[in-house]
Every structure is written in structure tokens, then in C-alpha cells.
Amino acid sequence: MGFFSKTCEYALRAVMYIAAQSSDGRKVGIKEVADRINSPAHFLGKILQNLSKEGLIQSTKGPQGGFYIEPDGLKRPLADIVIAIEGTRFLNGCGMGLSYCSQENPCPLHDDFKEIRARLNIMLHKTTIGQFNEKLIQGVLTLNK
């Protein structure tokens, strides 16, 4: 079980796969991405459409079409993907999902989750979309379980 929702997991994996393929100018179709990241194609199509609307990935139609990422997009933080899928509540909300949790009115996990959330925020904001391209291309890292 991952830390992120299944939608967010697929989005992160898909963007990283597309980023690695875009490094040599390739465009990839939904079926290829779905096969390479072990995702249902129909569900992934909706995710990619959302990410495209958010400007995280680009797409072109036609026989030479597909999804790709512009070079500047490779410098964007992973936090942009998480926020596009989960919204900002994921990065600043209660660990137990409570709407009233705060420093003044803490849930049982408040203090511990506050530290975890801070570290997660730092990692997601410091890590870029294209940071793992070389190791993904070399096969050192995987996006398929």
C-alpha cells in the first residue's frame, strides 16, 4: 500500500515515465504508458487529461501524437503533480482526515503527523519531475510493480 491515493500514484508514475521518454523527443500513447506503469488505460486516460489541462504534460493528436513534457516542465517539482490530483489539503491537512484539526484543537496524531507532513512537503517541493530520467532510462529505477 502506498502513501498516496491510487490516482496520485498513477499520476506520479505516468509523469515520470513520460518525462523519461520525452528526453529524446519521443511522444507516448496512453496504452504504452499504462503498460509500462501497470495502470488501467481508461483510468489513466482521465488522469493524463487532467494533468494536460494543468499544464504538467502536453499532448498532440494524430499519427505522430502522444504525450510529452517540454524541457522546462522537467524542472517542475513533484508537488505540482500531487496538488493537481489531491489538492493542497494533502500537503497541509490532518493525518486522520479531520476538518477541525489544528494546533489549538489537535487530533491524536497531530504532532507526529506534522513532522511527517513537513518532511514530505520538502521532498515533494525539492524533487523535480525530470530528476530521475537518467536512472529510469538505464533501468536502475522502475515504475512498474
Image: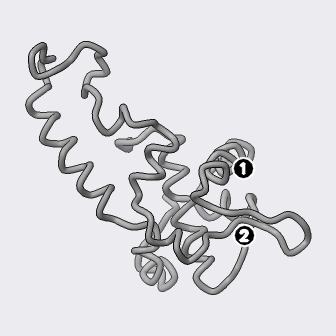
Q: Is residue 20 left or right of residue 64?
A: left
Q: Which residue is mark 2?
A: 28
Residue type (three-letter) at the residue carrying disc 2: Val
In x, y percent, where is residue 75? 44, 71
| Relative to 135, residue 52 above or below | above
Q: Is residue 117 left or right of residue 83?
A: left
Image quadrant in which you'd find residue 68:
bottom right
C-alpha span from label 1 to label 2? 13 Å
Question: Considering the image in quadrants, where does the N terminus appear?
Answer: top left
Name the front one of labels 1 and 2: 2
Q: Residues within 10 Å of mark 1 (few under 14, many from 20)?
A: some
In x, y percent, where is residue 96? 26, 22
Numbered label attached to residue 41:
1
Q: Is residue 139 left or right of residue 59?
A: left
Image quadrant in which you'd find residue 108:
top left
Way the structure is coloured: one colour
Q: Residue at x 44, y 64 (%)?
A: 76
Q: Residue at x 72, y 48 (%)?
A: 45
Residue type (three-letter) at the residue carrying disc 1: Ala
Q: Residues within 10 Å of mark 2 (few under 14, many from 20)?
A: some
Q: Is residue 120 left or right of residue 5?
A: left
In x, y percent, where is residue 105? 12, 13
